[in-house]
Amino acid sequence: MYKTEKLIGHNEKLISLRRPHWIYLAEGFFWLLLMTAVGFLIEFVLFKYAGSKILYNYGLLLDVNLRWVTFDQYFTPFPAMMFGVGLAVFWPYFLIYISTEIALTSQRIIHKRGLIFVNVDQVDLEDIRAEHVDHGLMGWFIGYGAIKLDCRFIDDVRLPAIGEPYKLVRASHNARLKNSAIDYGEEEFSSHDKRIKAAEQNNNRKEKMARLKAKMKASFRKAT
């Protein structure tokens, strides 16, 4: 597998190497199990109503002899077919999980994806104007988020969901501060750091739960 370390030059230092959050793998398994369950459900319905006039009228009764297996109204190919559909849905999530890497170096952020056909997005730290973390409902609850990099001169870069995204954002600002080639002073760093801390606190699960409870209590009081 192509390693992201090969993209790092001799004059730069690797600070952080991150992989996508396990939610990609969980979501892929969810669809795989759901599609397989649907296949067994279809088979159960056919088994339950096998021999009925409805099945005969619509030609749904099966009688197929293959070399290794026989399909009939009691043993249908639907579970295997739906498993194949689930596998097709599962594979892209699995591929993202195993083949994607996000590297932060002293000069840039690198987003590598793909096993055989590798695609690489990279942006210099000095070209990043702002970072936006998108949690979503599940991300807020579990603790992951996708980072969108607002860039100058090039298209914006969207990174996949990772755990504790604000740590990567904060580390990128630290790297920018330490890079003497980038015009980035202590005052600007302090301003961005306060903004990052505020966003992190605002999206903290405990803080959000407390605000949600307060809103529910206020709504209940108004209703009564």
Image (spheres, grey):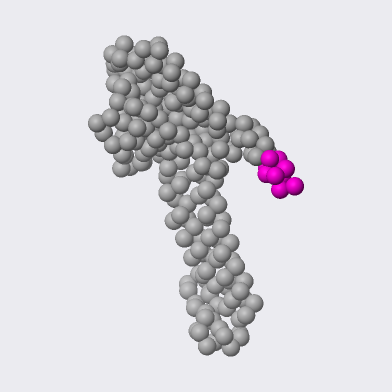
Residue at left 48%, top 74%?
A: 66
* Coordinates of residue 201 in the picture (x, y in percent): 56, 27
* Among the 4 quarters of the image, the one containing residue 173: top left
> Which residue is outermost to the right?
224
Q: What range is drawn magenta here?
A: 216-224
Residue at left 44%, top 50%?
A: 91
* Coordinates of residue 111 in the picture (x, y in percent): 36, 33
Residue at left 58%, top 31%?
A: 204
Work out whether residue 171 can be spotted.
no
Q: In this image, 222 relative to 79: left or right?
A: right
In the picture shown, does residue 20 fall above or below 172? below
Residue 37 is inside the magenta segment: no
* Coordinates of residue 181 in the picture (x, y in percent): 28, 13
> Which residue is outermost to the left?
153
Q: In this image, 179 relative to 215: left or right?
A: left
For the residue pair 18 and 50, the one nearer the viewer reads as: 18
Q: In this image, 68 relative to 44: left or right?
A: left
* Among the 4 quarters of the image, the one containing residue 169: top left
* Coordinates of residue 122 in the picture (x, y in percent): 31, 31
In the picture shown, does residue 35 fall above or below 164? below
Main SS type for the magenta part? helix
The quarter of the rendered structure image containing the N terminus is top left
Q: How many marks?
A: 0
Residue 218 is inside the magenta segment: yes
Residue at left 56%, top 64%?
A: 38
